[in-house]
Amino acid sequence: MAPPESDAVDFQQAQQVGTFDTQNYQTRIKEYYRKLDGFKLTPKHVDISRLRVSGPQGKVEPLTVIDDPADWKAADLQGREDAYTYQLTTQDVAELTSAVANVKSTGVSTEEEIQKLTKEDFPLPHLRPKLLEIGREVNSGKGFHLVRGFPVEHYKQDRLGLVLAFWALGLHLGRPLISQTDYKADGTVFGSILNHVTDGRFIKAKQEGYTNIDRSKIDITRLAFHSDQGATDLIALLSITAAPGGGESKWVSAVAIHNELLRLGRQDLVEALSKEKSWWTPRKANQQAYERKPDGSFKGFEEEVPFAYHDGYLSVHFEVNKYQDIKLTPLQEEAVLAVATIAEDPKFHLAKILQPGDLEIIHNPTIFHSRGDIFDGDSHAEKRHLLRWWVASDANKRPIAPLFAPRSNVQPTGGFIVPEGSQIRLPLYPYSRHDGQGQAPSE
């Protein structure tokens, strides 16, 4: 499939398209699930004993069943939560809170000052080896891990301390990346290396002059299984508060989905998902509008591959919303729905309600994640609120495939690029609250 003809999109058009897509997100997701509900994945005859096998990751051959620890199903892990969960000990928490207290005693109080900190500012002699082992497990094992007992309650009245503690874990695991880009009314881009995932997080920013679209409906609506953009490897989500209802987090192994398609005799779908020069997806306006061509326009579409084989690795990127915006061939559409069907199967995905203090860490090229509808309460304490960072992990040995995830506006090692001199944000509070800048003394 060739790139779409309507490749040149100007800045105003891009903003309008982005706003239209967001305002119709609930309709689009309902249409997607209606289509998925009516889809039936049809197996083809295959002699499973004759399927070629390769692996582990680093030794993967295309179109083979991958023998790797990341080939897991939820059914395999039933009753084995200890296989993917670490409970912080009293000593772990004491060490972390002590390190944070020492940093605070130096006068660090602003996001600019936090950005100058390194892992050496947070000595964690006993906890660090455990974090590094978790990082290795996420990168080279199952592709995810759940950490419980983060001291959220300890920092209930201390947002600075909470952010510092969460940031310390990221610094010990690797290099934080720009995980979100936004722009002001004049088109000036800024990036964020810490994100708040909560209802209506951008509304206040929009009122303060930013052109961030109103995401109040997106932030509480179920999300289909997907990968994050930016070609990052580690994604962490820390629960600060949980909603009274909903908000279930789900994880599924992309390796298991890949293998299941082959075992069902659907090599044709795996071939379609890994075929280059076939997948052209739209670029997000707020990440691309400043990358102008000489004529003032910017490229509206770019090539990616959902299943990317590269240097002995399979890296998978899956984003249903983008596939809804392009014309797929019948085989491509069947492939997308087949991946989604397996991902939605409870035998394949794990589902958990993240309680305050729960921290999920996932490997973006290996794990798809999703979230159920959220039913928030009226007070801040009853609104689902997560902190998120992306990190280029020190444990990562995987080369990034050239067509893994959208590559434009992405650094070579992952994370978004912003123009030189752009403001980089590490907000203590969501943009939607208080002064619209993510800074305030109290909730």
Image (tube, rainbow, N blue to C red):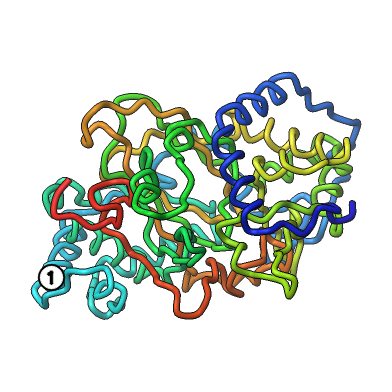
Q: Position of residue 198 (x, y in %)?
A: 36, 42
Q: Which residue is mark 1?
A: 104
Do we see residue 357 in this rendering?
Answer: yes
From this view, report whether residue 226 is shown above or below residue 177: above
Is residue 198 toward the left or the right of residue 91 in the image?
right
What residue is shown at x 29% (from left), y 79% (from top)? 116
What residue is shown at x 23% (from left), y 48% (from top)? 434
Is residue 57 toward the left or the right of residue 142 in the image?
right
Where on the picture, by quarter, is residue 312?
bottom right
From this view, report whether residue 118 is shown above or below residue 276: below
What residue is shown at x 42% (from left), y 55% (from top)? 210
- Between residues 261 and 198, which one lies in front from this camera angle? 198
Do we see residue 125 in this rendering?
Answer: no
Q: Position of residue 355 (x, y in %)?
A: 30, 37
Is residue 44 toward the left or the right of residue 224 in the image?
right
Where on the picture, by quarter, is residue 365?
bottom right
Q: Position of residue 65 (x, y in %)?
A: 77, 49
Amino acid found under the numbered disc labelled 1:
Lys
Q: Quadrant of the C terminus?
A: top left
Helix, strand or loop at label 1? It is helix
- Between residues 385 and 237, which one lies in front from this camera angle? 385
Figure label count: 1
What residue is shown at x 49% (from left), y 61% (from top)? 181
Where on the picture, by quarter, is residue 259?
top right
User: Would you call the spot at circle 1 few (<14 residues within 10 Å), some (14-19), or many (20 or more)?
Assistant: some
Q: Position of residue 196 (x, y in %)?
A: 35, 50
The residue most toward the left is: 105
